Image: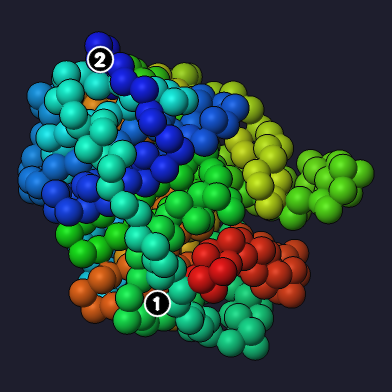
Amino acid sequence: MSSPTFTYPIPDKFWIEKLCHWADQQFDFFAFSNGNGYTYPEEPFETRFFAGNRQLTASELWSEPTDFRKVGIIGYDFKNRLEKLESNNPAFFELPELCFFEPSFSLEVHGKTILSEEELPEEFIQQIDGIALPQCPSTACAVTPQITKEYYLKTIRTIQDHIVEGNTYESNFCQAYSGSFDSWDPIAAYFRLNQLSPMPFSALFKAKLQWLVSASPERYLKRKGNKLIAQPIKGTIRRGKSAEEDRVNKETLAGSEKEQAENLMITDLMRNDLSKISETGTVQVKELFGIYPLPRVFQMISTIVSKLKEEISFSDIIQASFPMGSMTGAPKIRTMEIIDELESFKRGWFSGAFGVIEKNGDFDFSVIIRSIIADLEVKKLYFGVGSAVTYDADPEQEYEECGLKAQAILEVLSGK
């Protein structure tokens, strides 16, 4: 955000939630990103709020530089425009592959203070503070997995056959949960999810009647000037129930050759992606196999940085690197074909990217995982979970890992 000059105190802890309800009534689009105060390599999301009514065309998204920000989503199936690929699985509901808007209203949040580039009306803070939150918001929605455990285990073994045949080295196979509802409050669901599972790339996004409720732990790409940063996550273990169990689990993940092999394959894939658009010799692994604590899991995260070539555009960067390698596998293109053959659903926004592009071309995008995607018109929602499948993966353990990743979302959707 460029030099906010006006600051205002936030009256109470519910003010941002009230702001979201206000924006829902006033705007077709809004977004709230929240880094939740994490100490994260290259910083988490900034805590910011954007709202507007003007959806951008594809040409406006790719054009640069511009005198306005762009906030939105690149759906996973945008891959089909970048490579000769298809998405033939059924969609739960149709979602735009590109969905960006121009904010006409922006705020930055620092602790208990709001920062604004423009002076806000004197009564604005009090007006939002006076909004009454829904008394009994509905976050409940009965969901069912799209595939059985038996089918999942069988599919993992099929992927391992592909690995033996040399078609893939690692595949991120995902399953989906879906459900229908009469009434569902995405704003309440977001704040409940963020309470249960605060993440460094948490986000709430509204596009008319379609919503993203995200508790993502993963960065796709960040640009700061000519510096590009990728941070793939591969490697997961649950948090312990005691300090000692926590320490043992952390050490187990850090020393796991299997998890390191998974992470290294994707780190190498991202190094290769970044090398296409970076100056020769500048692609570096800043941290390999970093272990970071999140509310319910430890994650193994690697950080790759590079120096962009001159005249490289946002379009060039997406062409070279999308979708995030951690959500596909390696080699990327053949593995995406295998994924589409074996998965039961069209991913849509899931495993795409959400983020903000600044006026100067800098940007920060998360990977859309640990996220609920909903359509209030058709009254349906879904979410996906997956894990990396390698030759030595244990199908039962992979299934358990998916359940661990789904846990917080299932608690939100239980309505409790």
Image colouring: rainbow
Snapshot quadrant of residue 316: top left
Q: Which residue is mark 1?
A: 345
Give x and y (percent) for residue 356.
Answer: 29, 36
Give x and y (percent) for residue 116.
Answer: 25, 21
Residue 41, above or below 411? above
| Residue 138 - label | none
Residue 119, above or below 47? above
Identify the residue shown where x is 60% and y is 36%.
302
Label 1 Cα crowd, 10 Å radius (few <14 / some 14-19 / many 20+): many
- Drawn side of residue 250 relative to residue 334, left or right: right
> Can residue 272 be seen in the rendering of this structure?
no
Residue 123, above or below 369? above
| Residue 6 - label | 2
Quadrant where the image shows the C terminus: bottom right
Give x and y (percent) for residue 68.
Answer: 13, 29
Amino acid under disc 2: Phe
Identify the residue shown where x is 52% and y is 65%.
412
Identify the residue shown where x is 37% and y is 46%.
17
Amino acid under disc 1: Phe
Residue 392, above or below 22? below
Snapshot quadrant of residue 86: bottom left
Give x and y (percent) for residue 184.
Answer: 35, 71
